Image (tube, coloured by chain):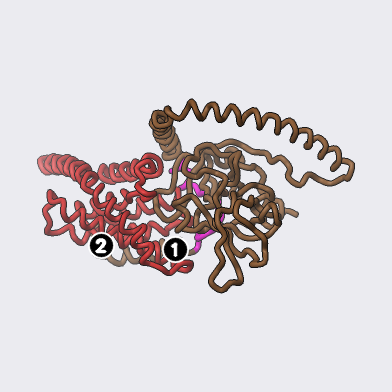
Chain colours: A red, B brown
Amino acid sequence: MRRFLITMLILIINIILQSTLFNLIRIHSIIPNTALVVVVSMALLRGSPEGCLTGLGAGLLHDIFFGSSLGYYAVFGMVLGYLAGKFNHGFYKENYLLPVMLCFFSTVIYESMIFLTGPFFYGYLNYPYFFINLILPEAVYTAVLAIAIYRILFSVNEHIEKKEKYKRKLFSIKK
Amino acid sequence: MNFFHSYKRQILYIVIVILAVSALVTAGRKRKATVLDNTLGFVITPAQNIVSTVSSWFGARISSIHDDTDLKSENAELKAQVEILKSENKRLSMYEEENKKLSGLLNIAQKYPDYDTTGTDIIGKDPGNWYLTFTVDKGTKDAIAANMVLTTAEGLVGRVTESGYIYSKAQSILDSRSSVSAMSLRTGDLGVVKGDYTLMNDGLCKMEYIDSDSEIMKGDEIVTSQLSDIYPPGITIGYVKEIVRDDNGLTKYAVIQPAVDFKHLSTLLIITKNFQKDEQQK
């Protein structure tokens, strides 16, 4: 329950910052996708089910405040959370290489899915243009920011895990 | 809990299908915000408001340091301009009086009436790179509804796509999903102003479907036309920056420099009369 509330709080803080403060750090009007970093990090730290839920939450928030239909971004968030969660097993959580790489590739996948399903696909059909001018810079920018955000979420996760362990011990003594 | 674990994959598929269907069903619908939207709005909108106020305050401080050197020359320039505008304003107000009298005599309604407006602030911008939508801090509480038109003193900004209780979502005219029926003020040629991704980041948009025989030129003022059921006629959109002829030679399009500076928007005016609704009621 505590974990659920903290994840929700992180997502809400993220969308507030993304829609206000992060507009100031646009480089050539490209803004990094920090929501995706949160989803990928959560999935890596906790596995597919929680990655799915985080993706669902992040997508729904985006849908409600900026989307034109309910569920559009939520589907993409869920799928990416699920896929990133597959890497949960067998990786050192202290290692930054995998989260950064995953953030890069999930941004590419996420934006490509938006391109394929959005009005751009019907209007332009020139994926290379969008890949070079939008998707690639965004993915690089996101991957760079992922280092800092993953570090924060890593310590948040560690903190919660410690609390949970303590609780479990408490219960076992009572038994 | 066991149930969830054994049917994890099935549950995932079902949720994805439900979301996909809901995305298709609700796509593009001008709707009022639901209870869920409004509850989240109560949490997020005030926070957005505070953060965007603080960040725009700092942004203004930083840019004022930048601009300090130019201030003196700019001030002198502006003073001269004010004098010119003052005299022009006097002349125009005389025209207005005359116009009112004459149209009163002729018994015709004003073509470009004053619209009722309320002021509003932008509190959040779409955190994605594809679209240009934003949230403003007025909603159904202040009688704002979908399809109301957003302007500034300079010209057209966009329209409201959805309104919650204390916030509204709006779409800028630079967004690639937006299209506005427009005409050239000088020649009366009709066209459609559309957002275009390749131009959006430079703050420009496109006017399409212009007749190839039309005499539209660089520098012409583009305003909203009477054909639109959402936008009231006579609102300045921008000025023609460049005319481009299509490959087939039958049509041409114009690149429009909007009258509004989209990079530095903060306070907007909402025209609080829903033109589409009026049409339907008739």
Q: Position of residue B44 (x, y in %)?
A: 42, 40
Confirm whether the magenta stretch covers residue B21: no
Residue A83 numbered mark, or none: 2
Image-based side of A105 in relation to B79, left or right: left
Q: Position of residue B119 (x, y in %)?
A: 58, 36
Furthest toward the right, the residue is B105
Q: Secondary structure at mark 2?
A: helix
Is residue B107 in view from this perspective?
yes
Q: Position of residue B270 (x, y in %)?
A: 60, 41
Q: Quadrant of residue B253?
A: bottom right
Q: How many marks?
A: 2
Residue A118 numbered mark, or none: 1
Picture residue at 42% right of the left edge, 59% below the top: A72
Q: Which of the chains bears the disc numbered 2?
A: A
- Dot 2, crowdedness within 10 Å: few (<14), some or many (≥20)? many
**Range shown magenta:** B25-41
**Quarter the C terminus of chain B occupies:** bottom right
Q: Secondary structure at mark 1?
A: loop
Q: Which of the chains bears the disc numbered 1?
A: A
Is residue A42 in view from this perspective?
no
Q: Amino acid at mark 2?
A: Leu
Q: Amino acid at mark 1?
A: Gly
